[in-house]
Amino acid sequence: MGTVVQLKNQINNSYFQLKDSVDEKLVLTEEKIKSKLDSEVQLVQKMTDYHIRTGGKRLRALLTLGSAKLCGYSKGSRDINLAACVELIHSATLMHDDVIDEGTVRRGKKTLNKVWNNHSSVLIGDYLLSRCFEMMVEDGNLEVLKLLSSTSSKIAQGEILQLQHKGEVDMLEETYLKIISAKTAELFAASTKVGAILSDMKNKEKEALEFYGRNLGLTFQIADDTLDYNSEIKLFGKKIGQDFFEGKITLPVILLFQKLKNDEKRNLIKIFNKEIRTKDDFNKIITLINKNKIIQECYQKAQHYINLASNSLSVFKDSKEKDILKNLTLFSLSRNF
């Protein structure tokens, strides 16, 4: 038991090490986000203030700041501005996500669309994106502008692809990976690559950090989707079953479907075709997932992306910053908050 606790502490420490290493810049990033969301429109101010108070890990901002530090950036505040920028893109996508998924709770608090309404939430998401594009233009680097605008486009396409395949229990694993690559991994990749662009690194380093971020993002999303069906994890703070009750088809469901007999497959399809899924339905799925060792298989697949991410950093010389980013791959898979 002691060994497990030590491992958990080590995993979570990798996140806090990154946070501590860029702490002053992260505080300035928070201030930048807050100042950029100021508005004379009362409802806009209320909703953005509420959003800021809900917090978050700020992982994408940390990746931009950490990557810039790895690459030796020390010229000014462009890393702070662009860290704020990637967080605004992320926040906007979450707001749109909650409307599409009819989400009611995020980070333990009511979503914007639950407190106000769908129309306002979509427009606030658009407001965040417009503020983000202002910051990109202010930065003045065409490569950054091209990267982040392209990333925003890919995220939107990922959302649409997910909608296109909504409720498809027999979804191909390849399709699932395309969805999470667009929806999640693209922004991780952009967050890390920006750090190399700011530092005027060569293409080799830019591509390495982009590859690192993309595989870190894939790991992060696979782990997040797996947690929804992992009844053994009590410390994470995320209520299990959320994706199931919303009818999302994720990797555990896809792998389970592949292993079931025909009659079990029909029953699984029937459950996901229901208008409202019950706790009994969820318990049946959990039983099948445990019986077929689906959680272990998901983590094995995620481990592949961890290895890719970790190995991509070999182009950089050994440093504290490199070790922190390398250790962060474990956090993306096994975090408990």
Image (spheres, rainbow, N blue to C red):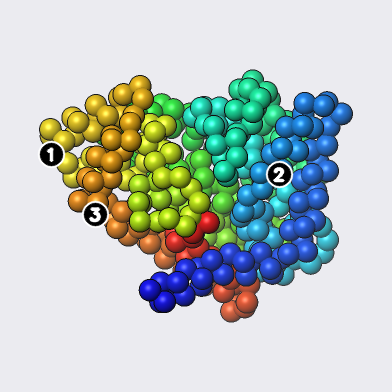
Query: In the image, what residue type sits under mark 3?
Result: Lys
Asked if residue 159 lies left or right of residue 133, the reply is: left
Task: Compare marks 2 and 3 and give the one earlier in the sequence.
Answer: 2
Farthest residue toward the right? Answer: 40
Q: Residue 194 appears at what percent x and percent y?
A: 66, 54
Query: In the image, what residue type sits under mark 2?
Result: Arg
Q: Residues within 10 Å of mark 2 (few under 14, many from 20)?
A: few
Task: Compare marks 1 and 3 and give the one earlier in the sequence.
Answer: 1
Q: Residue at horizontal 22%, vertical 45%?
A: 288
Tell me if residue 239 comes above or below residue 105 in the rendering: below
Spatial separation of the CA atoms under disc 2 and disc 3: 39 Å
Spatial separation of the CA atoms under disc 1 and disc 3: 15 Å
Which quarter of the rendered picture does the N terminus lie within?
bottom left
Camera-side mark, 2 or 1: 2
Residue 277 seen in the figure: yes
Asked if residue 241 lies left or right of residue 79, the reply is: left
- Describe the element under mark 3 as helix, strand or loop: loop
Residue 334, quarter of the rendered image: bottom left
Q: Residue 332 appears at what percent x and percent y?
A: 49, 59
Label 1 sits on residue:
261
Q: Residue 31 appears at what percent x and percent y?
A: 81, 50
Q: Residue 141 appears at what percent x and percent y?
A: 76, 48
Asked if residue 228 lies left or right of residue 125, the reply is: left
Q: Residues within 10 Å of mark 3 (few under 14, many from 20)?
A: some
Label 3 sits on residue:
293
Query: In the image, what residue type sits under mark 1?
Result: Lys
Label 2 sits on residue:
53
Q: Residues within 10 Å of mark 1 (few under 14, many from 20)?
A: few
Tell me if residue 301 comes above or below residue 9 in the rendering: above
- Describe the element under mark 1 as helix, strand or loop: loop
Farthest residue toward the bottom? Answer: 318
- Describe the element under mark 2 as helix, strand or loop: helix
